[in-house]
Image (spheres, rainbow, N blue to C red):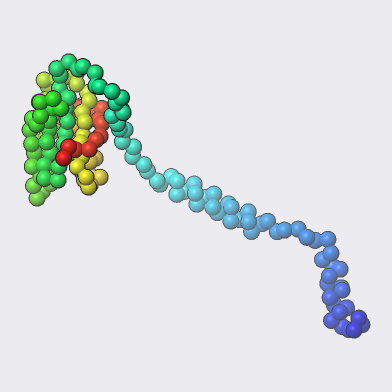
Amino acid sequence: MSGSRIAGRQRRNHGRYKGRNDINIVPMLDVMVILVFFLIFTAVFSKTNILELNLPPQQAGNPPDLPPTLDLEVIVHKDSLVVADKNTGPLSTFANTSAGYDFAAMTAYLTRVKAQFPDKRDATVLLEADVPYDTIVQVMDAVKTFEGTAEGKPARGELFPVISLGDAPT
């Protein structure tokens, strides 16, 4: 059998490739180059908006004695928005109609509140369970800034930019 044609061919071909145990990395490099370009081009088109929040701190013990000032709260219910003072209770209510919440009226009311308390910068937004994220962002935008006109030009002003989030009272 050692003299057969097939055995001779195997010996000859096996001897030709002896010592060539290298791995061909060219296809792997091609794939890596394609992945790098894919990651670079897709990373350019991703856009993330970040909204800064200041969550209320954990309180240990009794709260400190505060001077009689406005502690502004905006309570988001499924049927209304309530602007309230933490110490005295509700100040104004804005109903949720079929067209949605009346953010413009709430912003106008908060503009009048800001005129009476110009140094006040913080507000708390209290949310009921299952409030849509879009509604939370719109409420925060309405509490943070207002848009109007100044000297015939569109203007934007700051109301209460330091916003804390919490759960609405039941």
Residue 152 vs residue 45, the one in the foreground: 45
Residue 162 vs residue 86, the one in the foreground: 86
x, y percent for residue 130: 22, 47
Report the side of 42 relative to 87 (left or right): right
What quarter of the picture does the C terminus occupy? top left
Which residue: 19% across, 17% down?
66
Which residue: 47% across, 48% down?
41
x, y percent for residue 1: 90, 84
Residue 78 vs residue 156, the one in the foreground: 78
Residue 168 vs residue 44, the one in the foreground: 168
User: Quarter-wise, where is residue 143 in the image?
Assistant: top left
Give the vertical position of 16 relative to 42 (above or below): below
The answer to whether residue 63 shows anywhere in this view is: yes
Q: Residue furthest right?
A: 3
Give the vertical position of 144 relative to 69 (above or below): below
Report the side of 22 relative to 137 (left or right): right
Which residue: 17% across, 30% down?
73
x, y percent for residue 164: 25, 31
